[in-house]
Image (cartoon, grey):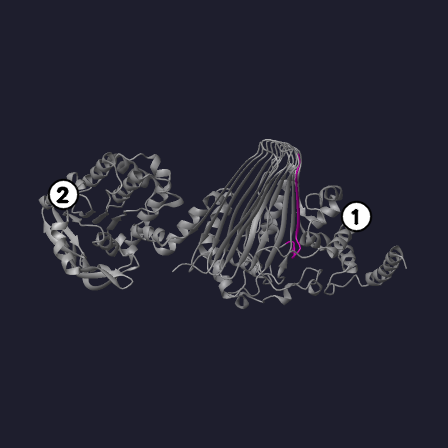
């Protein structure tokens, strides 16, 4: 039998099974495991157009040939991809805790410290909430205002139905389906996420946040986000929230794509505080995320700001491809690892256009037995005349059982480039703490003062309210880390 | 205000102060002089409450309280101020922010309300003017990238802002050229009076040309071996320390 015959037979076999399978479309949950039928099932469940099914299938076949990367500086037991359920209808909250009494008291204490209202606490902890509170009306108000400006901001599943031409045009153009193992997996099975389109010349009238629609859509573990800023537009997008979120799914493999046209600017801010697991790191989230933006047009700008304090493993490199001339890429990051948390994070700045500029400011804080890695790549391509990069990565250690590591890759192929790299590692000094104490400041306040000073260059990039929350979050996260 | 009796203290079980006694009354300026390794900085750190310095015997009474029982920040809030020999930097934290945090910590300790922004800025303005401090210094991160002279001046400025009852100057003159030394000394002199006690630790007599002490004590091998008036400092300048320390060396050798 020739190979083409085998393929053909396989296809027929698949089709038969596929038809058989479709009769079961009323099921709420796919069986565990990943195969073509599962993908067809997901796509059919979501009533997706043919092209999207093709997109998913292509990604799936590519995924089969890819190997899970192993170069990262994080350790975790092997993941059984055939043991994951890739589709389940939004759960009625029956399986979750019935009341806050059943929720981890440690989690509730943190909510309280953050000043989160009771109803929101319930929502975050996955407790069934009887009445849908204010956020619906708030969301409606926002929606009207955005509509007036012509901004599209909706779940990506909705965008597939309402604006298929936009989604089809841009989906997978920044992160190709064959990019790498987890990106391909996401492309094959993504559940939902966010779609944003800002039309030409429009300055988005508000900060876009997923927070106020979090109860509307359970985006699940394979989140997909696509943000397109058309010529001369501006948008600021906030992802996540400071409250620690509980989730049954351990593996999170999100893909986020940003596209900035000529003269457009996208500011993407993240505060990530997924459940980090217990003292031993058990039960924490694996946050394996692919985030990439392209400065497609001249004079465009993409800025990533992230504050990563949660998850048992954080593994992501929000990157920018600087294709347009004079385009700007920025990456500001604070990553905190404590207990047994691990983070391997950083960025890639790929300079293709002329006079492109990139700035990387990374602040890693390690406490307890946390391991913190900065890994970054700056690539100046031969055609990228007069490109400039400035990188600063600083690590701070609290205690003597944690670790900080820096892996910078610099690849310059144009001799007009200016690339600067600065790195420091410091131990939060007993001398610094004593200095503060001698001026009357308590040890705990001294630690948060010193750490906030260390992170200042990143915090000032965050939108105001987010910065205040992030400062507080860091303070709470660091409690008891010293002394 | 301060009474140190037969104080033994050291690091890792090795004694550095060996039965030191000293009494400072309100409004007095005491100078502690002595050769390297005599225990001058140890005294400063023990009084401020640095963790690794452990007092093993003797007592320290401060305004009727057992100073050694108090946490470092409590001592600070009770009015003990240490001008560090090597002030550390705190990157990203501006001087004014830091000072505001310190003042508010003290106010909270005393059960007072936090200082309001206007009052604080007025205080900064007054004090920086009185001490001739460049206000540009105040917006920079605490001691970060400061020259030696700027650091010392900043210590004096902090002292003025925090208005302590007892100020300990740990070799504030070290590493300063003569102009910077004058500025620092002027600052200290302007803060004299009001019942404020000073312990001025120095290796060299020259600082005492500008800050005239009421008493001079010579510290050697962990205890005070000679006390006198300001003329003792001049004698030391002339003869060095050896005439006071030889006998001890003979014992130790």
Quarter assignment of residue A163 = top right
B96 vs A227, left or right, is left
Mark 1 lies on residue: A51
Mark 2 lies on residue: B237
A134 vs B91, left or right, is right
Q: Mark number for residue A468?
A: none
Q: Position of residue A180 (x, y in %)?
A: 68, 51
- Secondary structure mostly taken by the magenta-highlighted segment of the chain: loop
- The span from disc 2 to disc 1 (Cα, nearest Å) is 92 Å
Q: Position of residue A203 (x, y in %)?
A: 60, 35
| Of B8 and A214, the residue lying toward us | B8
Q: Residues within 10 Å of mark 1 (few under 14, many from 20)?
A: few
A226 inside magenta stretch = yes
User: Which quadrant does the C terminus of chain A fall into?
Assistant: bottom left
Q: Residues within 10 Å of mark 2 (few under 14, many from 20)?
A: few
User: Image point 75% across, 47% down: which residue?
Assistant: A161
Tally the marks: 2
Quarter assignment of residue A190 = bottom right
User: Image point 44% across, 56% down: which residue?
Assistant: A478
Which region is colored magenta?
Answer: A216-230
User: Image point 26% across, 34% down: which residue?
Assistant: B132
Q: Secondary structure at mark 1?
A: helix
A358 inside magenta stretch = no
Residue A324 drawn above or below residue B4: above
| Chain of the residue displaying label 1 | A
User: Which quadrant does the N terminus of chain A fall into?
Assistant: bottom right
Q: Is residue A235 visible?
A: no
């Amino acid at each position: 039998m020739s190979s083409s015959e085998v393929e053909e037979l396989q296809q027929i076999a698949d089709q038969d099974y596929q038809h058989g399978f479709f009769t079961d479309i009323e099921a709420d949950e796919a069986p565990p495991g990943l195969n073509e039928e599962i993908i067809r099932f997901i796509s059919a469940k979501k009533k997706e157009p043919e092209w999207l099914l093709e997109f998913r299938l292509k990604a799936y076949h590519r995924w089969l040939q890819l190997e899970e990367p192993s170069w990262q500086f994080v350790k975790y037991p092997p993941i059984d991809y055939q043991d994951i359920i890739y589709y389940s209808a939004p759960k009625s909250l029956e399986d979750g805790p019935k009341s806050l009494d059943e929720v981890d008291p440690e989690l509730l204490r943190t909510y309280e410290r953050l000043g989160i209202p009771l109803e929101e606490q319930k929502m975050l902890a996955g407790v069934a909430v009887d009445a849908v509170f204010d956020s619906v009306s708030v969301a409606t108000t926002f929606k009207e205002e955005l509509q007036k400006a012509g901004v599209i901001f909706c779940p990506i599943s909705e965008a597939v139905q309402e604006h298929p031409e936009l989604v089809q045009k841009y989906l997978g153009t920044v992160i190709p389906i064959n990019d790498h193992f987890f990106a391909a997996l996401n492309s094959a099975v993504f559940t939902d996420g966010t779609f944003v389109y800002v039309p030409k010349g429009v300055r988005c009238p508000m900060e876009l946040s997923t927070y106020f629609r979090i109860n509307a859509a359970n985006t699940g573990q394979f989140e997909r986000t696509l943000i397109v800023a058309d010529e001369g537009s501006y948008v600021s997008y906030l992802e996540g929230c400071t409250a620690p979120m509980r989730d049954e799914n351990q593996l999170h493999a999100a893909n986020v794509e940003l596209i900035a046209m000529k003269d457009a600017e996208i500011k993407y801010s993240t505060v990530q505080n997924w459940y980090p697991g217990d003292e031993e790191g058990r039960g924490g989230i694996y946050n394996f995320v692919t985030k990439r933006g392209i400065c497609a047009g001249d004079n465009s700008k993409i800025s990533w700001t992230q504050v990563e304090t949660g998850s048992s493993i954080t593994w992501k490199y929000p990157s920018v491809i600087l294709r347009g001339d004079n385009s700007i890429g920025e990456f500001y990051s604070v990553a905190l690892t404590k207990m047994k948390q691990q983070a391997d994070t950083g960025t890639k700045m790929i300079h293709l256009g002329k006079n492109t500029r990139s700035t990387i400011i990374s602040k890693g804080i390690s406490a307890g037995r946390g391991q913190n890695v900065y890994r970054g790549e700056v690539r100046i391509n031969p055609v990228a005349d007069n490109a400039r990069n400035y990188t600063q990565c600083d690590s701070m250690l609290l205690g003597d059982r944690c670790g900080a590591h820096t892996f910078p890759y610099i690849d310059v192929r144009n001799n007009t480039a200016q690339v600067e790299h600065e790195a420091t590692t410091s131990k939060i000094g007993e001398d610094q703490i004593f200095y503060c104490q001698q001026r009357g400041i308590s040890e705990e306040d001294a630690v948060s003062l010193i750490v906030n000073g260390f992170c200042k260059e990143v915090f000032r990039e965050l939108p105001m309210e987010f910065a205040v929350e992030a400062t507080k979050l860091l303070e709470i996260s660091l409690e008891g880390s010293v002394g | 205000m301060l009474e140190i009796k037969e104080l033994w203290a050291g690091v890792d079980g090795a004694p550095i102060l060996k039965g030191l006694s000293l009494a400072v009354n309100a409004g007095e300026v005491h100078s502690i002089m002595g050769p390297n390794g005599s225990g001058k900085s140890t005294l400063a750190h023990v009084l401020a409450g640095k963790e690794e310095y452990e007092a093993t015997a003797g007592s320290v009474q401060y305004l009727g309280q057992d100073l050694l029982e108090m946490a470092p920040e409590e001592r600070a809030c009770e009015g003990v101020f240490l001008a560090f020999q090597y002030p550390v930097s705190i990157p990203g934290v501006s001087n004014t922010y830091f000072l505001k945090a310190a003042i508010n910590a003290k106010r909270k300790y005393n059960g007072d309300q936090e200082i309001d922004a206007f009052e604080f800025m007025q205080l900064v303005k007054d004090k920086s003017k009185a001490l001739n401090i460049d206000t540009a210094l105040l917006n920079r991160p605490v001691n970060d990238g400061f020259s030696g002279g700027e650091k010392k001046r900043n210590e004096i400025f902090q002292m003025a802002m925090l208005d302590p009852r007892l100020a300990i100057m740990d070799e504030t003159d070290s590493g300063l050229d003569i102009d910077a030394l004058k500025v620092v000394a002027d600052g200290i002199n302007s803060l004299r009076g009001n019942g404020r006690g000073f312990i001025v630790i120095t290796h060299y007599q020259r600082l005492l040309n500008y800050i005239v002490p009421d008493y001079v004590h010579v510290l050697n091998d962990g205890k005070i071996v000679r006390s006198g008036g300001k003329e003792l400092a001049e004698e030391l300048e002339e003869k060095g320390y050896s005439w006071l320390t030889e006998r001890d060396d003979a014992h130790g050798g």
